[in-house]
Amino acid sequence: FAPDVRAFVTNAQGGTDLVEGSAALAERFPDFAGMADSFRATVTQVHEIDGTTALFMVEIRAARKGRTLHNFAGILIRLSGDGRMREYHMVEALPAESDAFWSA
């Protein structure tokens, strides 16, 4: 990530939260520790918009603490001139289920 990355990350209500800066964004991502065998993020589609912007569809499957998650997310990224991510937009099909899974 670029140090000044701006990210719009899905929240439990289906809206998005603005997260600014690479450190804050890294903290916002879930803790994947101990999930090597159960977490799968499969890119199902990619649409390159231009040389710095792309749209992805991702299928997420995960299991932890006796719970399972199957979800889809649309992710749009924009890169800076040095190839680092400077903008990140995310929407999820089932935001409340995802929030419950990761916060448990």
Image (tube, helix red, strand yellow):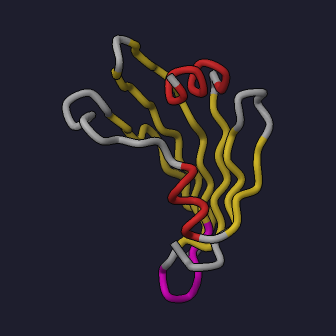
The quarter of the picture where residue 63 lies is top left
Query: Residue 65: x percent and y percent?
Result: 35, 18
Query: Residue 52: x percent and y percent?
Result: 58, 74
Nearest the camera: 27 or 44? 27
Residue farthest toward the left in the current orientation of the protein:
37
State the residue at coordinates (51%, 59%): 26
Could you tell whether 104 is left or right of 16 in the image? Answer: left
Could you tell whether 28 is left or right of 91 in the image? Answer: left
Stretch of the chain drawn in magenta: 78-83
The quarter of the picture where residue 23 lies is bottom right
Residue 10 in the image: above or below residue 97: below
Query: Residue 86: x percent and y percent?
Result: 62, 73
Could you tell whether 1 is left or right of 94 in the image? Answer: left
Magenta stretch mostly in which secondary structure? loop
State the residue at coordinates (50%, 22%): 104
Residue farthest toward the bottom in the current orientation of the protein:
82
- Whether 96 is among the magenta residues is no
Query: Residue 50: x percent and y percent?
Result: 61, 70
